[in-house]
Image (tube, rainbow, N blue to C red):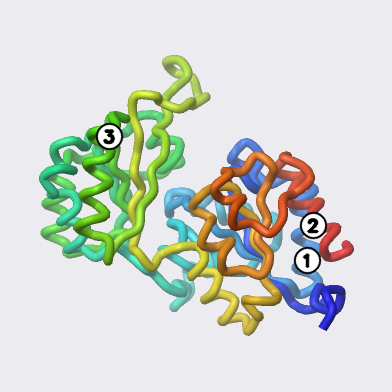
């Protein structure tokens, strides 16, 4: 079958949000909404895959309503798959791949991690966010101005012990010191390589006191941890199978950062923006013409499907 015939078949189109599709991290552009609506009218399946947690669910529901989506949402980088517009109905949750309670407790009480960590944050499978910090970085990136519980490290560990609850995600904060970071990473790799996956990133801080603009904090970094089997690639594979769509032939994904690597490796066509992380570009099949989160994705989809 030639490429033009394949394009006419039903596709699964998966969109990362931050740095890929959203404008200013809060909204979809008008052109993107219009193109997505046209694709949905043609019976293509459009899904969102994000590293964001459940605190962004209200915001994500609005995106689904505006684009008239009624599809699955991938959150926590693949640890949770659900239909956000169908959460009140029974069995709306499709699948969860959490970090077990036991592993969560082991990580948080590990001597090296406990000694050097500045802050903990956990997202439980009850979708409760518990954090030792409420500074602007956590409020803007993880809480999204939604409810959270502030507790100290010991209280968080005690909660896990009492409730026996699992976690979608663990976030650890450290000083960006090479010796400390190397020690922590080595510990995570050696002790938990069969249970978790993780990646490091910059912690952000206010540009100036009270400013909503956040910039990289050169003194601190964070490590995000999730279940070894929780990634966007596996989530896309599950959703493609659910819709009886060929993963190898009729899937397209757009991303911009290293948490999109597994997704790029799974789909038929992985697309990145020009200013995406270079490590991700090594796995991409193509690069959009424009950096603009509205123009880049929308124009690529418009040209590819001849809309």
Is there CB contact under 8 Å for labels 2 and 3? no
Is there CB contact under 8 Å for labels 1 and 2? yes
Q: Which mark's residue is nearer the viewer, 1 or 3?
A: 3
Name which quarter of the figure residue 39 lies in: bottom right
Q: Residue at x 39, y 33 (%)?
A: 203
Helix, strand or loop at label 3? It is strand
Q: Residue at x 15, y 43 (%)?
A: 112
Q: Which mark is residue 39?
A: 1
Q: Position of residue 179 (x, y in %)?
A: 24, 33
Per the model, the C-alpha gap separating discs 1 and 2 is 6 Å
Per the model, the C-alpha gap separating discs 1 and 3 is 44 Å
Q: In the image, is residue 157 above or below residue 262?
A: above
Q: Which mark is residue 174?
A: 3
Q: In the image, is residue 123 above or below residue 173?
A: below
Q: Position of residue 138 (x, y in %)?
A: 38, 36
Task: Identify the image quadrant of the N terminus.
Answer: bottom right
Q: Which mark's residue is nearer the viewer, 2 or 3?
A: 3
Helix, strand or loop at label 1? It is helix
Circle 2 packing at 10 Å, graded few (<14), some (14-19), many (20+), is some
235 or 130: nearer the viewer: 235
Is there CB contact under 8 Å for labels 1 and 3? no
Residue that label 2 marks: 35
């Amino acid at each position: 079958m030639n490429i033009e015939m394949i394009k006419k078949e039903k596709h699964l189109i998966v969109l990362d949000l931050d740095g890929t599709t959203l404008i200013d991290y809060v909204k979809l552009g008008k052109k993107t909404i219009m193109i997505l609506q046209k694709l949905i009218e043609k019976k293509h399946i459009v899904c969102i895959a994000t590293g964001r947690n459940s605190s962004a669910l209200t915001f994500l529901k609005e995106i689904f309503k505006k684009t008239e989506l009624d599809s699955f949402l991938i959150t926590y980088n693949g640890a949770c798959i659900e239909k956000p517009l169908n959460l009140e109905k029974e069995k709306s949750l499709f699948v969860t791949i959490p970090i077990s309670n036991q592993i969560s407790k082991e990580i948080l009480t590990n001597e090296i991690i406990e000694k050097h960590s500045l802050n903990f944050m956990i997202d439980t499978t009850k979708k409760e966010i518990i954090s030792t910090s409420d500074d602007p970085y956590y409020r803007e990136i993880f809480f999204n101005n939604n409810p959270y519980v502030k507790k100290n490290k010991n209280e968080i560990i005690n909660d896990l012990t009492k409730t026996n609850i699992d976690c979608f995600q663990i976030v650890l904060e450290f000083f960006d010191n090479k010796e400390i970071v190397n020690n922590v990473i080595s510990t995570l790799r050696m002790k938990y390589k069969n249970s978790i996956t993780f990646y490091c990133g910059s912690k952000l801080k206010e540009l100036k006191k009270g400013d909503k603009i956040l910039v990289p904090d050169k003194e601190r970094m964070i490590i995000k941890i999730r279940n070894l089997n929780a990634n966007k690639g596996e989530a896309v594979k599950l959703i493609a199978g659910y819709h009886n769509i060929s993963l190898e032939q009729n899937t397209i994904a757009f991303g911009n950062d290293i948490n999109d690597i597994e997704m790029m490796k799974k789909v038929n066509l992985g697309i990145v923006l020009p200013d995406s992380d270079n490590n991700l570009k090594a796995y991409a099949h193509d690069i959009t013409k424009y950096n603009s989160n509205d123009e880049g994705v929308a124009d690529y989809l418009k040209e590819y499907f001849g809309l």
